[in-house]
Amino acid sequence: MVSTRDDQSDGELLALYKKGDQEAFKEIVSRYKNPLYGFLRRFLNQQDLVEDVFQDTFLQLYISKDSFDQGRPLRPWLFTIAANKAKDALRKIQRHSTVSLGAIADTGDATVDDVVNILTSYEITPDQEVSEDETRAQVREIIAQMPENLKAILILAYFEQFSYKQMAEILSIPIGTVKSRLHTAVVHFTRKWKSINRSSDNP
Amino acid sequence: MNSLSKEEKDIILDFYFRCGSAERINQARDMIASDPRAADLYASLENSLKSLDSIKYEPCPDNLAELTVARLRMAASSEQARLESLLAEEQRRTQQPIGSGVTTKRSFWHNIAEVAAVAAVFLVVIGVYFPATSSMRQIAWRNKCSTNMASVSAGLGGYANDHNGALPAVDMNPGSPWWKVGNQGKENQSNTRHVWLLVKDGYVNLDDFICPGRKDTQANQFDTAKTASLCDFPNRQAMSYSFKFMSNKTAKKNIGSKTVLLSDLNPVFEEALSNGGLWYNTNNAARILISEQLLKMMSTNHNNKGQNVLLGDGSSSFKKSRVMFGDDIFTVKGKSVYSGCEVPSDNQDIFLAP
């Protein structure tokens, strides 16, 4: 979190923000622009969508400011809006995509044992010849192809390090579902990642 | 590794994602430190997911943040405007009942401010519009006046054709009071009697002797029979031009491009001839001294800006100076005191009267 005015809490800023205080706008955007941008950049992987959703998120925060409880932390609220906006944006462009939004329903929720099994199923040998850029491209591709609910929870948990409770709020799902879905996301990613690297090791 | 219980595995997974209670986190730390199976599971997780780190952290571009703030400001200001509009509407509604307790002082000043604003706009519009239209009217009047002179010129041409090349002239004794316009006596006195012949004989309409730039003139109220019975213009208000002196002797002389036949009313004697002036309704004109101011005046027909002048070749034009061909057309050479009986000093002296 970037904070340039430590003397004011998120709640105080939001109270000013509600009244249309222009400096408060600026400060809130300044505090949350980087984590929000980072999340959207990973989740959407399309610059134009990222920028649209980024702006829409703050606008939505302004529009729905009256429904927000100032006692609650602002960050999960902001990510809730961003996640919903991002999902809406993806739905618009994924109508013709091969990846079904309901893909997660087919895979089923993974258990802890499933995670451990995939982790230990086979070892991958790090390929020294694969450049960092190639690795990044592969990872981006895997994430881009992930069902959106798995993708969202993996990014929120791994990169943003939200708690289960916060993720439950952001994604509007029970905490139990958060855990099982996160495990499923780990299984999904690990399987894809291992399959790519194994095939490159053993053509 | 398989010997780890489901709960233990769950604790390690939670710890990897920094989730769970403080107690579970401490528990996970202890397990990883003491149990190789737990450490292996944690390492496997790290090994599998560390590739995610290749997606580097990207800070938000400054322009995107600025654009977002700008959009937020716009949203806030539009909402503010909407709220103010609603508030104003509400206030207007609550102020409707008479004596409803709304302070009249604020309302009064509010009204004053509104009236002042409207008045200011009105004045600006007048300030811009009126001079423009006034100037346009002046130009239109000059043009109409010039048209009048063209009609007089055509009438003169017609008269000359019918009278063996002679312009209209009457027998007039030198020294007669040329200012007595409207005097219908037998004696030719006014320097308008010869011009009247053009009207009397139907060469020029009486209305054509009225400059549209003047406000003190009278519309023609005489029928043809009445006009034919008169010897002069009915009165001074029936014409607003000044004319060249013309006698029977000069009427047949060569009239050329340097002959000034008529112009807009001579401003020098206008005051003396006006109602209450020195020469008004008197038989013996008092003497008037030509002041510096009178020497500088242009005809009042066109707001003291200049005068239309008709020349002997039939051309007419608007002159911003009263000196033509080296001579002041409104005065007699060498004269500074006038009693209304003066005549041009010689053939070269241009003097238009009354």
Image: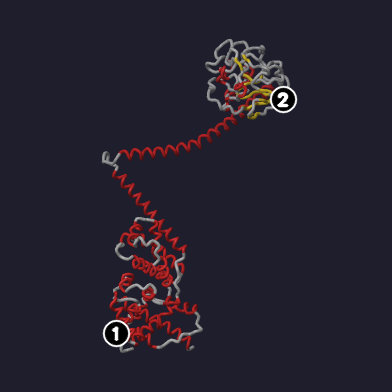
Q: Position of residue B92 (x, y in %)?
A: 32, 44
How dense is the environment of label 1, judged by Cα within 10 Å: few (below 14), some, or many (20 and up)?
Answer: few
The residue lying at 43 percent from left, 82 percent from top is: A193
Q: Chain of mark 2?
A: B
Image quadrant containing the N terminus of chain B: bottom left
Q: Amino acid at mark 2?
A: Gly
Q: Position of residue A19 (x, y in %)?
A: 34, 55
Q: Mark 2, residues whose alpha carbon is within 10 Å: few (<14), some, or many (≥20)?
A: few
Display coloring: secondary structure
Residue B347 position by quadrant: top right
Q: Reply above or below: B39 against B168.
A: below
Look at 45% across and 70% down and name the residue there: B58
Residue A192, quarter of picture: bottom left
- Mark whose residue sits in front, 1 or 2: 1
- Name the residue tied to disc 1: B6
- For mark 2, give the secondary structure: loop
Q: Mark 2 — residue?
A: B256
